[in-house]
Image (cartoon, coloured by chain):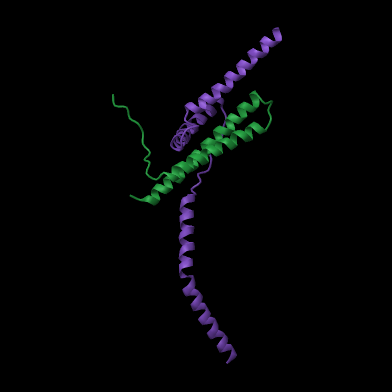
Amino acid sequence: LNCSAFDSFRFMIKGGLAGAAVYVAYDQGLLGSGTEGAEALKKAQETLPPAIQEWTNYLGWEIPTPPKIDFSISNYWNKGVHKVMSALSVAPTRACEYTVEGWKYVKDLVK
Amino acid sequence: MASEGDLGRKWDRCLADSAVKLGAGFGLGIVFSVIFFKRRTWPIAFGSGMGLGMAYSNCQHDFQSPYLLHGKFVKVS
């Protein structure tokens, strides 16, 4: 009798913890639409580094500052697309020119 | 009035949302795994998968509805 009461009490504690975790996730907008998720990420990006800084100051640890990565994926992607498309657009003309030159070279060799 | 800018913003929103949902699913999977499932791995995979699925669904909805504007409600007191 005592065991079953303790077990049910333990189960209720566990259920409460799990439910609280789900509720916190829902309340922060992590389980909502696309805009809410993006806003939550922006909020986290703003609040996380000062919080980490405060904690490390409190605990007395020294973390080295992460290096600044100046890599813009969208920039590189756009440049790559431009290059590929312009190469494709001049490809037939260039192929013609190279064929003509190659043919002339071969003719000169044969002469 | 750049529609390609709008598309870029949609992609940004989609990627940010995917990261958030994956993290939330992963975290909730860890919580459930520790609390209910004796620290097995499958709840974590299940949670991450659910998060990715929700993100995919949101992105699909965002890309397929070109006329919905994203705004905020401002309460006028």
Number of marks in the rendered image: 0
Front in this rendered view, residue A37 or A7 = A7
- Camera-nearest residue between A66 and A111: A111
> Seen in the image, is B44 located left or right of residue B56?
right
State whether residue B9 appears in this view. yes
Q: What residue is at 32 percent from the left and 27 percent from the top?
A: B75
Residue at left offset 58%, top offset 88%: A109
The N terminus of chain A is located in which quarter? Answer: top right
Q: Colour of chain B?
A: green
Q: Nearer the viewer, residue A53 or B35?
A: B35
Q: Say if B8 sits above or below A90 in the image.
A: above
Picture coordinates of residue A25, whole percent (x, y) = 51, 28
Left or right: residue A24 compared with residue B75: right
Above or below — where is A81 with respect to B11? below
- Residue A11, image quadrant: top right
Q: Colour of chain A?
A: purple
Q: Position of residue A69 (x, y in %)?
A: 51, 46
Q: Position of residue A29 (x, y in %)?
A: 47, 30
Q: Is residue B6 above or below residue B35?
A: below
Residue A20 % position (x, y): 54, 21
> Can you name the residue that lies furthest to the bottom here?
A111
- Residue A54 visible here: no
Q: Residue furthest top?
A: A1
The vertical placement of A2 against B30, above or below, is above
Q: Quadrant of residue B22?
A: top right
The C terminus of chain A, quarter of image: bottom right
